[in-house]
Image (cartoon, rainbow, N blue to C red):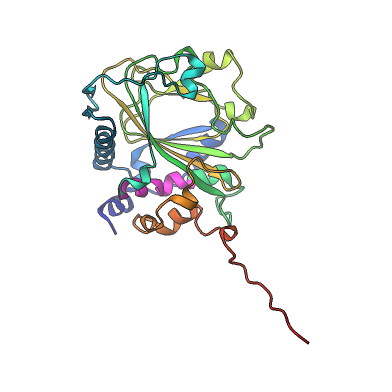
Amino acid sequence: MSSNAEQLEATTTKPGLDPYVRQLDEQGYVVVPPAVTGVTAPMVDELTQRLLDKSEELIGCKFTVQDGPQSKLDYGDFRGFLELMSQAKPSQFQLMQLCTYHRIFRDLAVNPVATALIDHLFDATPQAKRPAARFSSHNSFIKWAGDGYGESLGLHCDQGGIPLPWGDKALNANCNWCLTDYTLADGAFACVPASHLEKSHPKWPDCVRDAIPIECPRGSLIAFHGALWHGAFPKKTPGLRVTISYYYRHTAILPQDDIPNHFPKELADDCADPALFKRLAGFGSPYQSQVYPLPRAVNG
């Protein structure tokens, strides 16, 4: 077992997740402290530094949490979907396919507390014999001071691309791992509590008025339902807000990243729970090849 897995096993408390499940059902989101998930400060430090190093490799300048990028960053004419909606200048970038970077990201993707909450969102009971949760993508958002998503806060639903009507169970869901402190001034996650019960897209303009910041210390997990109206407040302080976003889907929904076909399968064996990683990755679908037996023709 790796040191990360040993840390996880040693520090994860098991008082029962009922209070967190109850809030997830009632409010559409829940904040879980690191004392419950077992994600330690050294793990947060390593995850953060690996993301900063990867940012430097891909972008060409040094990054620190305290000071942000060493150089001015130029996006040219690029606008992401939420920036197009708000007309704000981009003040973040996204790193993708994190689970190919290093084992520590794969260990985080199979964190037992996070995956238990996700399984609850997708399945009728936590004891479902064939859990429906699958990976959709593994990303990180690196955000600095700016306009963020503008006055709209970028409020949206993660399952917004799926036609209405929606049911009670999530079709997409998210685990945001906060690698820096989340405060209003630092660009905290924004959401409208219990909005997942509306089973609809955000209702303008009231949704912005009703949005609240989710403030929590580094290492916290924010898990939320795919129908929750959410976005983010603009960051007004120096330095970076660093987040890992593990995005999950119901098995009936296509993934953002074609993990079942393109993720290096040998990497799945190198993590804290290979069987869980492979299930969430969607490996072994019987419809990707002729795996079911065929009858034989009998002559005479």
- Which image quarter is the C terminus in? bottom right
Q: Look at the image and say whether residue 58 sits in the magenta stretch.
A: no
- Which image quarter is the N terminus in? bottom left
Q: Is residue 133 above or below residue 78?
A: below
Residue at (61% x, 18% y) in the render = 203
Q: Relative to 14, is 4 on the left or the right? A: left
Of residues 74 and 192, which is closer to you in this image?
74
Residue at (73% x, 83% y) in the render = 298
> From which residue to which does the magenta span run?
103-116
Image quarter of residue 237: top left
Q: Is residue 9 above or below residue 145?
A: below
Q: Relative to 36, is 239 on the left or the right? A: left
Q: Relative to 272, is 299 on the left or the right? A: right
Residue at (25% x, 53% y) in the render = 3
Q: Is residue 110 visible?
A: yes
Q: Is residue 194 above or below residue 126?
A: above
- Chief secondary structure of the magenta span? helix
Residue 208 appears at what percent x and percent y?
A: 52, 15
Toward the bottom, the furthest residue is 300
Q: Is residue 15 visible?
A: no
Residue 37 appears at what percent x and percent y?
A: 37, 43
